Image: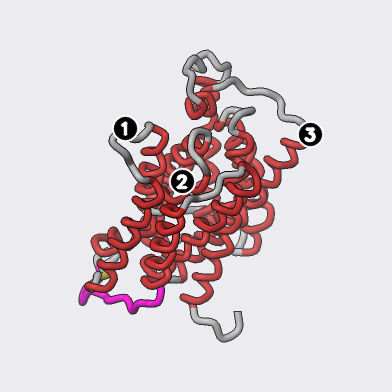
């Protein structure tokens, strides 16, 4: 991209990927009352892996790039993303979209912290303060009360940790694995996990709970309408592009540097919530959104500090 630095290109890749993922989040919530999660994921991943092999793999050097000497780490990375995606999507059936997304966006903060341990990056006082500011912003949005939190509200936190681990594994694999290979093994893990879920719960025999998140996970498979087929197919295309771009972004740039740009999804979730479900954040939520987005952007602008020795 002309004279742009690798970090700039990586940042652009992450922002575009996040926009695609935000559209995907909205669509999953939209369909959460009609189909089981593993059915949607299965169809989406099948389309995505076909597109990856047919289009992206040839662009990066052909089928040989899928050969890996680090299969265990590839599958571990894919498994982390499967856990992150499934727990987050299940939460969408019960939570408002902005609430789920804001809770999930502890992930870039966690990535920045984990980068200290696994990538040899260091935190100065400014970055520590900004991370604390971001977590406080999340609390403004979630606002746990004396009545406690529903289980669904905890799921985005599980998703955030799993996603953070996945991104750190991406950095570990970046030196030897091309983005197309990273995407391929992720889609493969989604297909395998969906097949397992279908075998266990695909007939709906466990759908006995009066809870929208449980039903989204456990209801029986059903044939999608023509419109829903089109939506799920579009999700496959978006997921292919987003997965490739997010992999490229974290390969090209420092994890703690590009991670905060994923906060773009927060205001987008507010927009989807308002337009589709008439969910509009109150004053406290707006304060939280400003805090987490502000913290993320400030971290992105602050100068990272590298350790004398990088841990491998």
Tell which of 58 and 180 is nearer to you.
180
Residue at image position (46%, 75%) is 7
* Residue under pointer 2: 99
Tell which of 25 and 171 is nearer to you.
25
The image shows residue 39 at horizontal and vertical percentages of 60, 31
Q: Can residue 70 be seen in this view?
A: no
- Closer to viewer: mark 3 or mark 2: 2
Residue at image position (59%, 58%) is 19
Quarter of the image with the C terminus in it: bottom left
Q: Is residue 278 above or below residue 245?
A: above
Tell which of 239 and 124 is nearer to you.
124
Q: Nearer the N terminus, badge 3 or badge 1? A: 1
* Residue under pointer 1: 147
Separation of disc 2 and disc 1 at Cα?
A: 17 Å
- Quadrant of the rendered structure where residue 26 is? top right
Q: Nearer the N terminus, badge 2 or badge 1? A: 2
């Amino acid at each position: 991209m002309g004279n742009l630095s690798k970090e700039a290109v990586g940042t652009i890749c992450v922002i575009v990927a996040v926009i695609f993922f935000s559209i995907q989040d909205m669509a999953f919530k939209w369909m959460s009352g009609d189909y089981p999660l593993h059915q949607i994921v299965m169809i989406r991943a099948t389309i995505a892996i076909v597109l990856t092999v047919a289009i992206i793999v040839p662009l990066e050097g052909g089928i040989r790039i899928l050969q890996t000497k680090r299969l265990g780490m590839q599958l571990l990375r894919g498994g982390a993303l499967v856990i992150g995606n499934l727990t987050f999507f299940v939460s969408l059936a019960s939570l408002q979209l902005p609430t789920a997304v804001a809770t999930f966006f502890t992930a870039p903060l966690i990535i920045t912290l984990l980068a200290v341990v696994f990538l040899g990056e260091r935190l100065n006082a400014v970055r520590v303060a900004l991370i604390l500011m971001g977590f406080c912003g999340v609390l403004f949005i979630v606002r746990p009360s004396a009545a406690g939190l529903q289980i669904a509200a905890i799921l985005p936190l599980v998703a955030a940790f799993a996603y953070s681990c996945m991104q750190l594994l991406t950095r570990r694999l970046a030196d030897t694995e091309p983005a197309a290979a990273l995407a391929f093994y992720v889609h493969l893990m989604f297909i395998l996990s969906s097949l397992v879920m279908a075998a266990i719960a695909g007939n709906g025999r466990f759908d006995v709970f009066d809870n929208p998140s449980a039903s989204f996970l456990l209801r029986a498979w059903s044939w999608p309408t023509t419109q829903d087929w089109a939506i799920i197919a579009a999700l496959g295309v978006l997921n292919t592009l987003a997965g490739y771009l997010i992999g490229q972004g974290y390969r090209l740039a420092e994890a703690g540097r590009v991670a905060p740009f994923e906060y773009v999804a927060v205001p987008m979730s507010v927009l989807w919530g308002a337009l589709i479900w008439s969910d509009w954040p109150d004053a406290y939520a707006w304060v939280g959104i400003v805090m987490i987005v502000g913290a993320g952007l400030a971290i992105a602008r602050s100068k990272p500090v590298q350790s004398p020795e990088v841990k491998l």
